[in-house]
Image: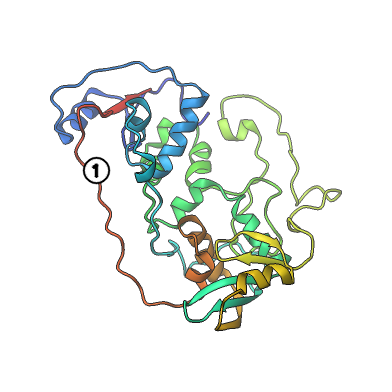
Amino acid sequence: VFVKPTTRFMIDDKFQVKPASTANCLKLLTELQIKDSRTRTENIGKDKVLKLMVRSLVSQTPFSDIFMNNLPDSNTSSTICPGKYKPRRAGQSQNVTDSATRISLNLVIDNPRERVLYAEAGEDFVDLLCSFLTIPLCYFFKEFPHLPFKGSMGKLYKNIQDLDDNSFKSKEMKETLVNPKLAPGLAQHNQLIGLEEASNLSFKTLCSNFEIKRTELGSSSNQEEVETGRGFVKPTKFMVENNLSVTHFSLESARKLMNEMEDIKEDKVIVDRDKALHLLAASLVSESALTDVFILKKPKQEQKQVNREDVDDDECCCCCF
């Protein structure tokens, strides 16, 4: 779909993509200090593809994990580690529909523990959370390079950025990967993050290989009969817990969360674009996103990360396609 069918590639165990060549192969073997290697042919079906996708999010060696059965024990399974919620271009404005858009939020806080119990929110805040689910995966690796994802997808994204344009069917194909946009019709009129919506490009425009008529698929900008971009949920009051689970607000649910809490306070906060970006990042790596974004705490010492540099005899060196 994206790369030329006549080009062969070499992908190492950390999802680094390079053109297949003897020079690149020898360089990799030298770097890994491998003297004894063997080749093996694998038939990859849907099941293996899905497993590779999952392992690439949490492992530095997804090929070895899947094809050499090097999966860790369930009690020591890798997870995404919390880190700094710092956007790549925090000071650079993006295409936000309304620069004055703000969302008001009422937080109920457990004062002694300095943690958010829940937030009383309207449909605008829940729409913001729902919009996180529509964002392309590559956007996170592009905008949040400081997030310590433990998997290999970040390296894959950086590698695709650096890959020669001639390896792709067209520059537009590469652009869809390195500068991802929302699918047509998913951009919200009052979105805070300001991720641009993709235009309805024809297959000819993307691929540059076929003579095919331009066909519009429909978006919020050119189909007046279908109201899109107006939000996901109906106007009502919601309860958003610290881990971002969303339910309809009720006094009974609030009472259960506040049960046995002696010192509780309410705080009204405003969610602007900066807070929305921090919340997006926190939602990826934290189970206490509301606390991490809205409660100021003394920074803790960052967890040390150990990179696996050595390759055992039963690990994959690379895969060629």
Residue 59 picture quarter: top left
Q: What SS does tag 1 mark?
A: loop
Residues packed near mark 1 inside 10 Å, few (<14), some (14 to 19) or many (20 plus): few
Q: Mark 1 belongs to which amino acid? A: Arg
- Residue 35 sits above or below residue 118 on the image: above
Q: Is residue 156 left or right of residue 38?
A: right
Q: Is residue 211 left or right of residue 45?
A: right
Q: Residue at x 43, y 17 (%)?
A: 43
- Seen from the viewer's position, the closer of residues 96 and 70 is 70
Where does residue 118 sit, x and y in percent of width and height? 61, 70
- Residue 247 sits above or below residue 207 on the image: below
Which residue is outermost to the front?
A: 260
- Seen from the viewer's position, the closer of residues 129 and 19 is 129
Where does residue 295 sit, x and y in percent of width and height? 49, 76
Where does residue 30 sit, x and y in percent of width and height? 15, 32
Q: Is residue 161 visible?
A: no
Q: Residue at x 24, y 27 (%)?
A: 314
Q: Residue at x 67, y 54 (%)?
A: 187
User: What residue is pinned by disc 1?
Assistant: 308
Which residue is outermost to the right?
A: 225
- Seen from the viewer's position, the closer of residues 219 and 47 is 47
